[in-house]
Image (spheres, grey):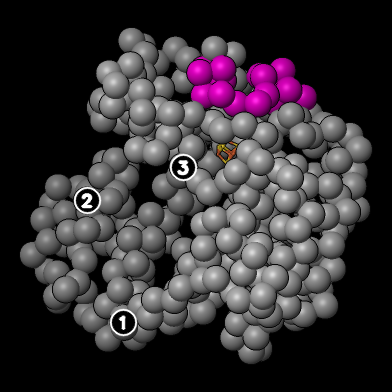
């Protein structure tokens, strides 16, 4: 099993909270697609032999800015150089790029899952975020995608927008659930230093909500989705049965993946690779057959700690027997005191040699994981 991630580093406009790698200058899109194809060719032996590619994920940036011909070109290149046994082919798309023609073209290319960046249905907040779409386009996007026959749909929602009450979030959840997308990814609004929001906060023009305020909205999210049959299979990801994202689930299970495009990361099971986060440098390097990425050999301990962090965030939790077999660490023994404390505080659950977070633990997921890190 393995996966391929393709990073498309272009956006129509910069959302005020976003610190992903993207550029609003789309002049070199064709060259970028060509160099992504070149990187796919040059790195065709990256993934371990005998592990066919099961998932392909176009992320960004805004992959839905590419034409169907450009997406098709990348997929053809993958087919040429990689052994495929595809179970999922995802495209991240923004609502303003969804129309019947695009949707039909994407479907014809074999895309079977769309992840739509909705974020909120509130008109004022969409403007504040500098999103390129309005809420009517969001609703239409879901309807059209369903009408064209996309069975696997996910929408992104952001919670934690500062306010004196939770009405906007309540409304967002209600509208989202009325559309019944089948999968929802939801993240807390954070203030990253190199964003407009970060700049405003530094100048005293914006102040983020408190942790308690955001925690209430996270609880509202968990509760309302649970009531209508969504399973929180990862702390920020909720899906109905049969709708869990395979690509992301594989990441969390430590399955190798190849990341292509500027800023993409890769992992072959031992070594992590980081592509350069600069569009021009990426294109110019690839033109000279220079891959422009750095590698970092992860130690056994690094991978073990990563596994604690990611596994605890999932519904399957941390399998202590596999953990001992894979890394040689008996966590129950080495972290006995910490585990007992977390169990007594009802932040963790221990069943059948699996550690999982309780609902209370999910509110403190990172601190719980860090307290179990090995050194
Ligand atoms: S569209 Fe997505 S990647 Fe682009 S700026 Fe907005 S949030 Fe970031």
Q: Which secondary structure, mark 1?
A: helix
User: Residue 362 at x, y = what percent?
Assistant: 32, 45
Residue drawn at 27 percent across, 86 percent down: 328
Residue drawn at 17 percent across, 59 percent down: 371
Q: Is residue 135 above or below residue 352?
A: above
Q: Residues within 10 Å of mark 2 (few under 14, many from 20)?
A: few
Residue drawn at 65 percent across, 85 percent down: 45
Q: Ligand 1 closer than 8 Å to the CB at disc 3?
A: yes
**Is residue 137 rendered magenta in the image?**
yes
Q: Which mark is residue 290?
A: none
Q: What separation in Å lies between label 1 and label 2 (alpha carbons)?
A: 21 Å
User: Residue 303 at x, y = what percent?
Assistant: 35, 74
Q: What separation in Å lies between label 2 and label 3 (alpha carbons)?
A: 23 Å
Residue assigned mark 3: 19
Q: Residues within 10 Å of mark 1 (few under 14, many from 20)?
A: few
Q: Which mark is residue 300?
A: 1
Q: Which secondary structure, mark 3?
A: loop
User: Residue 247 at x, y = what percent?
Assistant: 60, 61
Q: Which residues are magenta?
A: 125-140
**Is residue 128 rendered magenta in the image?**
yes
Q: What separation in Å lies between label 1 and label 3 (alpha carbons)?
A: 30 Å
What secondary structure is the magenta-colored segment mainly? helix
């Amino acid at each position: 099993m393995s996966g391929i991630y393709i990073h498309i580093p272009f956006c129509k406009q910069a959302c005020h909270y976003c610190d992903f790698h993207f550029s609003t200058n789309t002049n070199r899109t064709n060259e970028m697609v060509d160099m992504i194809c070149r990187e796919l060719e040059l790195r065709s032996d990256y993934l371990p032999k005998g592990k066919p590619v099961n998932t392909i994920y176009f992320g960004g940036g805004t992959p839905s800015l590419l034409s169907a011909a450009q997406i098709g070109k990348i997929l053809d290149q993958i087919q040429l150089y990689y052994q495929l046994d595809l179970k999922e082919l995802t495209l991240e798309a923004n609502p303003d790029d969804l129309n019947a023609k695009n949707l039909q073209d994407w479907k014809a290319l074999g895309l079977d899952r769309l992840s739509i960046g909705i974020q909120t249905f509130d008109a004022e907040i969409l403007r504040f975020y500098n999103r390129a779409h309005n809420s009517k386009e969001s609703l239409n996007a879901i309807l059209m995608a369903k009408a064209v026959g996309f069975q696997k749909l996910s929408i992104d929602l952001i919670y934690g927008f500062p306010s004196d009450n939770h009405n906007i979030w309540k409304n967002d959840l209600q509208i989202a659930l009325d559309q019944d997308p089948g999968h929802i990814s939801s993240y807390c609004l954070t203030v990253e230093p190199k964003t407009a929001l970060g700049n405003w906060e530094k100048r005293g023009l914006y102040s983020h909500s408190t942790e308690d305020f955001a925690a209430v909205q996270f609880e509202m999210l968990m509760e309302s989705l649970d009531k209508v049959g969504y399973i929180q299979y990862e702390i920020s990801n909720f899906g109905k049965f049969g709708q869990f994202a395979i690509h992301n689930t594989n990441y969390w299970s430590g399955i190798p993946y190849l990341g292509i495009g500027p800023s993409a990361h890769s992992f072959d099971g031992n070594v992590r690779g980081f592509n350069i986060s600069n569009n021009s440098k990426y294109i110019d390097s690839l033109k000279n057959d220079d891959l422009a990425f750095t590698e970092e050999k992860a130690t056994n301990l690094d991978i073990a700690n990563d596994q604690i962090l990611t596994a605890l965030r999932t519904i399957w939790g941390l399998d202590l027997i596999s953990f001992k077999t894979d890394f040689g660490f008996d966590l129950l023994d080495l972290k006995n005191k910490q585990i007992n404390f977390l169990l007594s505080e009802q932040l963790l659950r221990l069943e059948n040699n699996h550690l999982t977070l309780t609902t209370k633990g999910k509110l403190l997921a990172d601190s719980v994981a860090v307290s179990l890190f090995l050194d």
